[in-house]
Amino acid sequence: MDFNLRVATIYLVLAGSRAYGTHNESSDFDYRGIAIPPIETYVGILDKFEQVVDTKTKIHWKNYADLIQPESDLQVMELTKFARLACNATPSILETLFTEKGIYLKRSVMNKLLDIKEEFLTKRCKAAFCGYAKSQLHRATQHKRWLE
């Protein structure tokens, strides 16, 4: 990645259990962001930027060290990928749009997307959120069996 991720980021929010107040002492900090990288990542022969997922290396969180907790889990996604997933009613993506507290960075261009966030709430949401809930219930029952 040959550009400054912090400069390209237009939105950064707290996500996961801490965003909902369901965390405990051992819960980590999760952040999600949206970026508009330089034009060179869209055209030409340079590497394309889709996203940064930093859960193990903890390298990219340093771009936001003045905003977020040290060595946090971080996911910053390119705007068009984010919009595509929002159109598909991906629960974790829609969560990012509807966050009201825990907003750590918001550039004015992000207001255009936030102004139309309700447009992403389509009939697909029912299937997406029900599928997500079902998978979480399955995961919880598997975890319970593992504990017994």
Image (spheres, grey):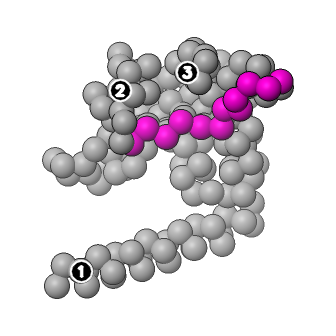
- Tell me the mark number nearer the camera, choosing from 1 and 2: 1
Q: What element carries label 3?
A: helix
Residue range (magenta): 44-55
- How packed mark 2 is, by other alpha carbons closer than 10 Å (few <14, some 14-19, many 20 or more), is many
- The residue at which mark 2 appears reads as 68
Measuring from the top left, give residue 77's x and y in whole percent. 60, 37
Query: Is any part of residue 110 visible from this angle?
Result: no
Question: Between marks 1 and 3, how big is the CA–CA gap?
Answer: 40 Å
Q: Magenta segment, principal secondary structure?
A: loop
Direction from residue 8 to residue 56 in the image, left or right: left
| Comes first in the chain, label 1 or label 3 | 3
Q: Mark 3 = which residue?
A: 5
- Which quadrant holds the C terminus? bottom left
Q: Which residue is drawn at 44% across and 19% down?
A: 63
* Label placed on residue 146: 1
C-alpha distance separating marks 3 and 2:
15 Å
